[in-house]
Amino acid sequence: MSILRRFLEQIGLYFVLMGRVFSRPEKGRIYVRRVLMEMESIGFNSIIITAIISAFMGAVVTLQMAINLESGFIPRMLIGYATRETMILEFSSTVVALILAGKVGSSIASEIGTMRITEQIDALELMGVNSASYLIGPKVVGAVLFFPFLCIMSILIGVLGGYMISIFTGIVMPGDFTEGLHYDFRPHSIVYALVKTAVFAFIITSVSAFYGYYARGNSLEVARSATSAVVASSITILLFNLILTQWLLI
């Protein structure tokens, strides 16, 4: 019962904090400036890792499909089709989000947690500033706006990685791969991926900020909060991946 009670208390604290986060900011111009700063910090700084992982993942998926679909009865163009669907439906939204939960989530939790234990947040409150809205709001908005761009970039780079491996290895003819990319394309799949990415961006930033905001103690506790933020974000992402797939695709 104590574990359940603690869990419900955490859920309640989270929603109370989100209510403060999305209250009206005191100065709109400063808020917009901070959103742009967070888009650069959270989004632009994640481009390289997203691009590298997507390129290799697209190449690996293509190789695995080519190796496992060696049959005269299976059209080779299905390799390109499977690569495209894998990148759109799952990897570029869910797997990239899990990776960013580790990179972005731990950074947010550590940053806000450090501000909490060094009493910078208390100083903001004493000055009459809504610290939750000022510190957390721009991070959430910036991530929700920028992460869909990372998703589209990941899809394109992943498909390009698969196409390049088909050229360099000859395991599938580039023409067959390209034909598969065009086969039975459904724009709704892109919408599904972008919606998932936006939801996951909200989860990563808000959950990580929550753990950082309520950090107490010393630097060791900040590290523990960052670890808890990554674990909680990842579990929540997997849960909502199941819910959104059931809601949007079935």
Image (spheres, rainbow, N blue to C red):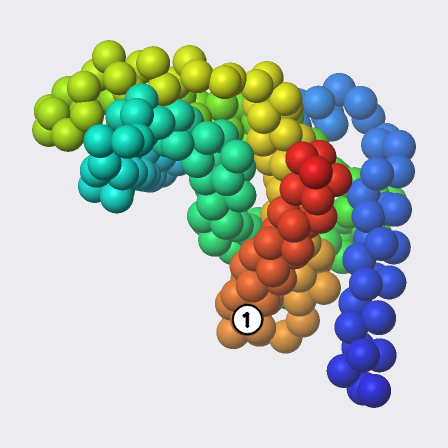
The residue at the point 57 percent across, 19 percent down is 186
- Locate the C terminus by quadrant: top right
| Residue 161 on image: x %, y % | 27, 27
| Residue 184 on image: x %, y % | 50, 18
Whether residue 57 sits left or right of residue 104 in the image: it is left
The correct choice, above or below, for 16 with respect to 33 in the image is below
- Which residue extends farthest left? 169
The residue at the point 78 percent across, 73 percent down is 7
The residue nearer to you, when weighing 106 against 115, is 106
The residue at the point 10 percent across, 29 percent down is 169
Amino acid identity at mark 1:
Arg
The residue at the point 66 percent across, 42 percent down is 245
- Can residue 135 be seen here? no
| Residue 79 on image: x %, y % | 31, 29
- Which residue extends farthest front? 73
Question: SS class of the residue under badge 1?
Answer: helix
The correct choice, above or below, for 77 with respect to 131 in the image is above
The residue nearer to you, when weighing 238 against 129, is 238
Q: Residues within 10 Å of mark 1 (few under 14, many from 20)?
A: some
User: Mark 1 — residue?
Assistant: 224
Q: Give the image quarter of residue 75.
A: top left
- Locate the N terminus by quadrant: bottom right
| Residue 195 on image: x %, y % | 66, 31
Whether residue 214 sits left or right of residue 161 in the image: it is right
The residue nearer to you, when weighing 166 against 147, is 166
